[in-house]
Amino acid sequence: MKELVHIHTYLMDANEVGEWEGQEALAAENINTLFHAVYDFADHDIDVARLEQMLDSVWQNWQHNPELIELDDDMIHAFVEALFTHFDPEQGQEDF
């Protein structure tokens, strides 16, 4: 049911990400890359509520993380993998 989640409602622009010492555009680009990576990795039949929880957790986990402006492919992959492992219904995790 992935198609029921509108990724554009999560995307941010430079004036929404807060202060990043002049690198707000890069921070917005990178957070949007993370949103897209999570969305793209999700199976088409993923539970909508689960995907929404995962997407909500992206900003919660990165909004104050200085590594956001240093994001690379390895970091993206590791984050997405950890997120999907955490939100696996068989794992029984509560908070990410």
Image: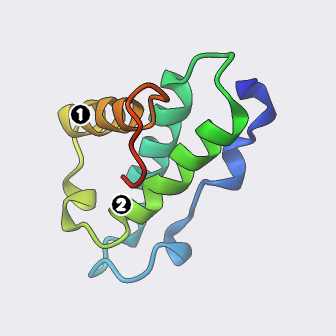
In the image, taking residue 63 as reference, residue 66 lies left or right, namely left
Residue 4 vs residue 30, the one in the foreground: 4
Give the amino acid type for the residue marked by disc 1 in the picture: Ala
Question: Which residue appears at 77% of the width and 27% of the height?
Answer: 3
Q: Is residue 17 above or below residue 94?
A: below
* Residue 3 marker: none
Count of marks, rendered view: 2
Q: Is residue 59 above or below residue 20?
A: above
Question: Which residue appears at 34% of the width and 61% of the height?
Answer: 62
Q: Position of residue 95 (x, y in %)?
A: 39, 55
Give the amino acid type for the residue marked by disc 2 in the picture: Asn
For numbered disc 1, what is the local secondary structure?
helix
Marked residue nearer the N-terminal end (1 or 2)? 2
In the image, taking residue 68 as reference, residue 61 lies left or right, namely right
- Distance between the Cα atoms at labels 1 and 2? 13 Å
Q: Is residue 3 above or below residue 9?
A: above
For numbered disc 2, what is the local secondary structure?
helix
Structural crowding at the residue carrying mark 2, measured as other residues with C-alpha within 10 Å and reported as few (<14), some (14–19) or many (≥20): few
Please name the colour scheme applied to the rendered image.
rainbow
Q: Position of residue 76 (x, y in %)?
A: 29, 37
Specify the farthest residue to the right: 4
**Label 1 belongs to which residue?**
78
Question: Which residue appears at 54% of the width and 24% of the height?
Answer: 42
Is mark 1 in CB contact (under 8 Å) with mark 2? no
Structural crowding at the residue carrying mark 1, measured as other residues with C-alpha within 10 Å and reported as few (<14), some (14–19) or many (≥20): few
Q: Position of residue 68 (x, y in %)?
A: 27, 58
* Residue 61 marker: 2
Q: Is residue 62 above or below residue 73?
A: below
Question: Which residue appears at 63% of the width and 54% of the height?
Answer: 10
Quadrant (top left, top right, bottom left, bottom right) of the N terminus: top right
